[in-house]
Amino acid sequence: MVKIGVLVSGGGTNLQKLIDVQKAGELTNGEIRVVIASRADAYALERAKTAGIEAMALCRKDYPDVESYSEALITALQERGVGLVVLAGFLTITGENFVRAFPDRIMNVHPALLPAFGGKGYYGLHVHEAVLGRGCRVTGATVHFVNEVCDGGPIILQKAVEVKEGDTPETLQKRVMEEAEWVLLPKAVSLFCEGRLSVEDGTVRINEETERGTSL
């Protein structure tokens, strides 16, 4: 059983989806062990507590620099035997020491089809504002492993979402979450926990047992 640590900064909608999937017995060979928030007032902590999952806040402002904050995260996760770290709306920068501590074991969900609309400054509604500003007809979400490059890690799964006439950043954000993020993240986490993901030459391989003909 792979122990999962989920890092959050806000409301925790993606966390809630993982909790729901786990409660339904559909999070294969994985268990959320701890939820860590970068803000003490993050509502995601309440979601974790309601589900009976350990919840804790490690606030960035309490640490002098990125490296020391990252070390605190590493210690908290390693003490709980976490084998997979999931960034679910975690908006705090971590250091390279964090990535080195969990190589190919940190997973992030991004609300666009990377490599488009990724990197510094592309988070939350800013992503959807940029998509609409460029007149894109299609957007989507990406789940990827985290490396030292912001939003630059190996892609695990992607799913396209139509951009509709009259969309606002808020309506597009909601549809991308419901149609893509909430589908992809639990699936990617399960694939990892089943031991079906590997990274070869910077590319993620999913073993042959994965469903064929499924449009993601």
Image: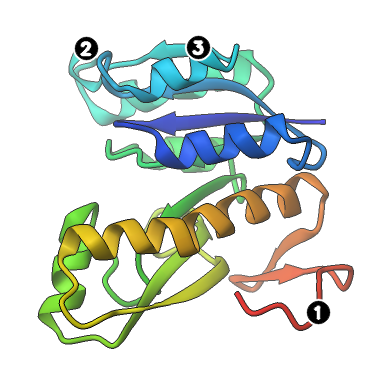
The crowd level at tag 3 (other Cα within 10 Å; few <14, some 14-19, many 20+) is some
Residue kind at label 1, given as amino acid type: Arg
Q: Position of residue 145 (x, y in %)?
A: 54, 56
Residue kind at label 2, given as amino acid type: Asp
Which residue is identified by label 1?
212
Q: Position of residue 50 (x, y in %)?
A: 51, 13
The crowd level at tag 2 (other Cα within 10 Å; few <14, some 14-19, many 20+) is few
Which residue is identified by label 3?
49
C-alpha gap between disc 3 and disc 1: 37 Å
Residue 119 seen by the camera: no
Q: Residue furthest right?
A: 209
Q: Position of residue 149 (x, y in %)?
A: 36, 59
Considering depth in this image, is 61 or 165 the residue closer to the camera? 165
User: Mark 1 vs mark 2: which is more N-terminal?
Assistant: 2
Asked whether the beta carbons under mark 2 and mark 3 sit within 8 Å of each other, the answer is no
Q: Is residue 133 above or below residue 119?
A: below
Q: Position of residue 112 (x, y in %)?
A: 35, 68
Question: Which residue occupies 69% across, 20% down?
Answer: 81
Residue 11 seen by the camera: yes
**Helix, strand or loop at disc 2?**
helix
Which residue is identified by label 2?
62
The crowd level at tag 1 (other Cα within 10 Å; few <14, some 14-19, many 20+) is few
Residue kind at label 3, given as amino acid type: Lys
**Helix, strand or loop at disc 3?**
helix
Residue 41: name its quadrant: top left
Q: Name the quarter where the C terminus is drawn.
A: bottom right
**Helix, strand or loop at disc 1?**
loop
Left or right relative to 183: residue 72: left
Considering depth in this image, is 51 or 146 the residue closer to the camera? 51
Asked whether the beta carbons under mark 3 and mark 1 sit within 8 Å of each other, the answer is no
C-alpha gap between disc 2 and disc 3: 23 Å
